[in-house]
Image (cartoon, rainbow, N blue to C red):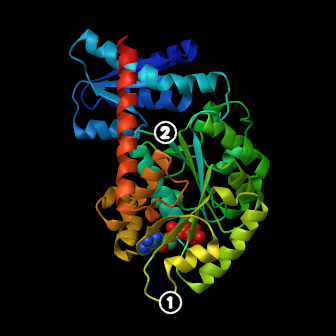
Amino acid sequence: MSGSDEALEKVDLLSPNILLVNAGGSDTDAVSLAERVIQRKPRTFVILLMQYMDLESYQLASAAGCHNIAPFPESAKELCGFVHRVFNTESDRITALDTNERATWSSKVITVYGAKGGLGKTTIAVNLALKLAEQKKKVAILDLDLLFGDVHIFMDVEPKETISDLMQEAFSNSIDSVRAFMTVHPSGVHILCAPKTPEYAETVSGDRIQSLLALLRSYYDYVIIDTAVNFSDPTLAALEASTTILFVTGLDVSVLKNSKVAMSILESLGQKKKVRVIINRAVEINSITIADVQRIVDAPILSRIPSDYMVAVAALNQGQPFVQSAPKAKLSLAIGDIAEKILTGTDHFDMQKLPARERRALMRRYKTREKAEKKARSRAQRG
Ligand SMILES: Nc1ncnc2c1ncn2[C@@H]1O[C@H](COP(=O)(O)OP(=O)(O)OP(=O)(O)O)[C@@H](O)[C@H]1O
Ligand SMILES: [Mg+2]
């Protein structure tokens, strides 16, 4: 039995709140121990201390799903400070898990929906998830395009298990069992992939999606749901459980016709107030303008994403979403802007409509508030 097997047995037995793993240079044993604990014990927060903090080892550790990675501290005081900080930021989550508290904290469910195929739903879902994870948020993507889901292709991961495998299990009260079915992307985003073949789509029911989402919300800061063009039971469950529906549309007559119909269905379902519209490939080259879209869909426009075929397709073919492969591209900046609005809670109105001065003032207020909160947190830790 290797040292890490023994450690794993101990973790199983003791279920500690925090596990410190000391990793030597490119120590794959330590990283694989961290990975196994992260997969099996969501209540145990793993801190990986690295003797040599080079880029390769860092990437290896984040690919294993580690969020708390630090160079080996120089003093006991520094170590205590770090452990304290991790515990303080994670303890809300531990409490939520332990008390089975559902969704009362800041967790958000964001469904990306569109009334036609090929509008860019998956592109937006995947890149948004990465942008949110960049801000150290715990993010999950649920691929609810049950027939032709391709989130794993956009993110270039090989699904171990899928949502249809999960549906055959009883997971009603445990996030631990759900985590075992998720695939970890090097960014730290956890993916629950669509069934490997379409015939398994039927194993996914609306009721189970509802309980799955409640469970995911008790652990993740953001659950992003990619959808297909339908109002099937799983999609309806997702829309109902969402805090925000990102409604993707475009600037052509056929898309707008479908969007109008879909919007009226959302209205009759009582979900329209959650809708924020994203106009993808927003080039005003013809007679349809952004103002026309606003009038036709009659919901706040959150963002206009430009068209950039080269960047979008290159990212897809390389299996590296463009917010990573081309962070400075206009497409990436547009997604960054959506992520910022979601993070700052300013997605409930059309920020673009504000004069630039007011927009800047709003961002300044948010940054000041964030700084003050950070200071208060570190004061509380010291005291
Ligand atoms: N803003 C954009 N500019 C250029 N190409 C884009 C843009 N957004 C998406 N694309 C490209 O459009 C194609 C369809 O995108 P995507 O698969 O995200 O759409 P979808 O709505 O999820 O489609 P489906 O309904 O089939 O699931 C992809 O090749 C993608 O790279
Ligand atoms: Mg798609």
How much space separates mark 2 and mark 1, taking CA atoms?
42 Å
Q: Quadrant of residue 245?
A: bottom right
As drawn, 45 above or below 142: above
Residue 340 in picture, x, y percent from top left: 42, 51
Query: Label 2 is placed on what type of residue?
Result: Lys
Lateral position of residue 211 relative to residue 68, left or right:
right
Crowd class of label 1 (few under 14; some 14 to 19; many from 20; radius 10 Å): few
Pick the front one: 84 or 353: 353
Q: Residue at x 33, y 39 (%)?
A: 60
SS at badge 2? loop
Residue 235 in picture, x, y percent from top left: 71, 58
Query: Is residue 63 in view?
Result: yes
Q: Quadrant of residue 375?
A: top left
Question: Marks 2 and 1: which is nearer the front?
Answer: 1
Residue 349 in picture, x, y percent from top left: 53, 57
Q: Residue at x 50, y 43 (%)?
A: 139
Query: Label 1 is placed on what type of residue?
Result: Ser
Q: Which mark is residue 287?
A: 1
Q: Quadrant of the N terminus?
A: top left
- Some atom of ligand 1 lies within 8 Å of the CB belonging to the residue at label 1: no
Q: Quadrant of the C terminus?
A: top left
Pick the front one: 131 or 188: 131
Crowd class of label 2 (few under 14; some 14 to 19; many from 20; radius 10 Å): some
Lateral position of residue 194 relative to residue 370, left or right:
right
In primary-sequence order, the first of circles 2 and 1 is 2
Residue where numbered disc 2 is placed: 138
Query: Is residue 192 in view?
Result: no
The residue sitting at the bottom extreme is 287
As drawn, 67 above or below 199: above
